[in-house]
């Protein structure tokens, strides 16, 4: 069975910290970040603004892409975000509707 996957980047309200993650349920995972339901990096730095995501038909492909993004520089992450979401709007609103 192939499971869908998502790679995402979240940030705090000031955009000073970026976190790249992978999940099979993007809406649920971002909800968890926004409500600080899971201890860790995102909770510590109040990362709750979804600024970038990619969809994959296979979670394994999403994991590979996550590793690729994580290994890149901050500049490369900023290029990804600005290419999709120049205003850095919270994309969670879009995926929930």
Image (cartoon, rainbow, N blue to C red):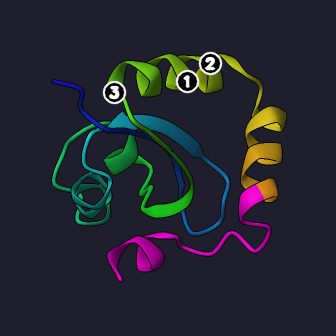
SS at mark 1 in the image: helix
Q: Is residue 1 left or right of residue 20?
A: left
Question: Which x, y percent locates residue 30?
Answer: 32, 58
Question: Which x, y percent locates residue 25?
Answer: 25, 49
Please state the extent of the stretch shown in magenta in the rendering: 84-97
- Based on the picture, tell me whether residue 90 belongs to the magenta stretch: yes
Say few, some or many: other residues with alpha carbon within 10 Å of mark 1 (under 14 / 14 to 19 / 20 or more): some
Say few, some or many: other residues with alpha carbon within 10 Å of mark 3 (under 14 / 14 to 19 / 20 or more): some
- Based on the picture, tell me whether residue 4 belongs to the magenta stretch: no
Q: CA distance from mark 1 to mark 2?
A: 5 Å
- Residue plotted at (30% across, 56% down): 33
Looking at the rendered image, the disc whose residue lies closer to the viewer, 2 or 3, is 3
Q: Which mark is residue 25?
A: none
Q: Earlier in the sequence, mark 3 or mark 1?
A: 3
Residue nearest the observer in this picture, 34 or 83: 83
Q: Residue under label 2, please give it.
A: 68
SS at mark 3 in the image: helix
Asked if marks 1 and 2 touch (Cβ < 8 Å), the reply is: yes
Q: Residue under label 1, please give it.
A: 65
Q: Residue under label 3, please give it.
A: 59
Question: Which x, y percent locates residue 18?
Answer: 59, 44
Q: CA distance from mark 2 to mark 3?
A: 14 Å
Asked if marks 2 and 3 touch (Cβ < 8 Å), the reply is: no
């Amino acid at each position: 069975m192939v499971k869908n996957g998502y790679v995402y980047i979240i940030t705090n309200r000031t955009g000073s910290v970026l976190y790249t993650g992978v999940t099979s349920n993007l809406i649920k995972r971002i909800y968890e970040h926004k409500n600080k339901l899971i201890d860790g990096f995102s909770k510590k730095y109040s990362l709750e603004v979804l600024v970038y995501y990619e969809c994959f038909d296979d979670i394994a492909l999403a994991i590979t892409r996550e590793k690729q993004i994580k290994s890149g520089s901050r500049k490369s992450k900023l290029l990804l975000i600005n290419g999709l979401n120049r205003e850095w709007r919270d994309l969670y609103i879009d995926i929930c509707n």
